Image (tube, rainbow, N blue to C red):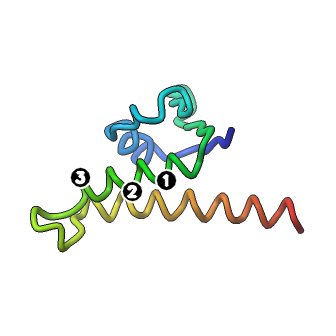
């Protein structure tokens, strides 16, 4: 399971999203504002659906400010995973 510590804002934004499709494979920890994700690929898929559903304008042509914030979190989590993988494989 991958664990990500988040800023207050990032954590609050993620808590607003609907990750119910993930069931028990995502755990939010209010104590230290972190999430633990069992299936990272599925998490990214659901996260992308949430960004498209909530972070685009009504014509689905432009990303809203909210959507840009979500994309920034998405990009940061993917970047952290890449760094972690590189560190493990030297």
Up/down of 62 relative to 56, above or below: below
The answer to whether mark 3 and mark 1 are in CB contact below 8 A is: no
Up/down of 46 relative to 86, above or below: above
The answer to whether mark 2 and mark 3 are in CB contact below 8 A is: no
SS at circle 3: helix
Given this view, does label 2 or label 3 mark the residue nearer the observer?
2
Give the CA separation, mark 3 to mark 1. 15 Å
SS at circle 2: helix
Q: Residue at x 44, y 41 (%)?
A: 11
The answer to whether mark 1 and mark 2 are in CB contact below 8 A is: yes
The residue singled out by tag 1 in the image is 44
Quadrant of residue 58 within the rendered picture: bottom left
Q: Along the line of sight, which residue is nearer the eye, 13 or 47?
A: 47
Q: Residue at x 20, y 72 (%)?
A: 62
Q: Which mark is residue 21?
A: none
The residue singled out by tag 2 in the image is 48
Furthest residue in direction left, as rendered: 58
Is the C terminus in the top left, top right, bottom left or bottom right quadrant? bottom right
Closer to the chain start, of discs 2 and 3, is: 2
Residue 69's spot in the image, x, y percent? Answer: 35, 60
């Amino acid at each position: 399971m991958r664990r990500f510590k988040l800023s207050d804002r990032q954590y609050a934004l993620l808590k607003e999203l609907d990750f119910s499709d993930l069931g028990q494979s995502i755990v939010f920890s209010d104590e230290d504002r972190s999430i633990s994700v069992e299936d990272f690929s599925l998490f990214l898929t659901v996260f992308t659906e949430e960004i498209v559903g909530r972070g685009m304008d009504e014509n689905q042509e432009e990303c809203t400010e909210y959507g840009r914030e979500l994309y920034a979190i998405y990009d940061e989590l993917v970047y952290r995973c890449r760094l972690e993988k590189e560190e493990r494989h030297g």
